[in-house]
Image: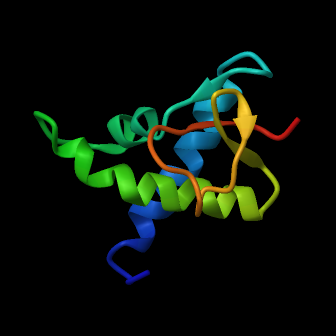
């Protein structure tokens, strides 16, 4: 991660945690929720933050704070294909 990317990626991590804190204990969010919350422009430029949001989620998985799911089941983000959800560790 470059020095330029670091602030955005750290902000995405914080936003993921904040979004989950504001929901029920068993609720999930989409990485796009975090990308949209962090994006400061107009239009769909938030889409460029999708991969950074997934990387932020991966770091939070490593830290033991969240888990990645597909179809309600925990999955390895490196092997996941398609849409994912993020939830607090159960």
- Return the x and y of residue 30 as percentages of the image width and height: 50, 33
Please, which residue is most extreme toward the top here? 24
Front-most of 58 and 40?
A: 58
Judged from this view, the residue extending furthest toward the left is 43
- Relative to 84, is 23 on the left or the right? right
Residue 83 location, x and y as percent?
Answer: 46, 38
Q: In which quarter of the image is the C terminus?
A: top right
* Label total for image: 0
Q: Residue at x 78, y 21 (%)?
A: 26
> Image check: 8 left or right of 61?
left
Residue at x 25%, y 43% (from the top left corner): 46
| Image position of 21 (left or right of 6) | right
Quadrant in which residue 32 is drawn: top left
In this picture, residue 39 sits left or right of residue 2: left
> Residue at left 82%, top 56%?
64
Q: Residue furthest bottom?
A: 2
Query: Residue 29 location in percent, x, y?
Result: 56, 29
Q: How is the image coloured?
A: rainbow
Task: Locate residue 36, reporting x and y percent.
Answer: 33, 35
Q: Quadrant of residue 71?
A: top right
Q: Is residue 2 above or below residue 39?
A: below
- Residue at x 65%, y 41% (from the top left corner): 17
Which quadrant is the N terminus positioned in? bottom left
């Amino acid at each position: 991660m470059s020095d330029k990317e670091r602030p955005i990626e750290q902000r995405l991590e914080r936003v993921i945690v904040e979004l989950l804190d504001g929901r029920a204990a068993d609720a999930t969010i989409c990485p796009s929720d975090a990308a949209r919350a962090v994006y400061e422009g107009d239009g769909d430029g938030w889409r460029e933050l999708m991969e950074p949001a997934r990387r932020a989620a991966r770091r939070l998985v490593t830290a033991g704070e969240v888990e990645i799911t597909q179809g309600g089941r925990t999955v390895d983000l490196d092997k996941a294909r398609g849409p994912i959800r993020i939830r607090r560790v159960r």
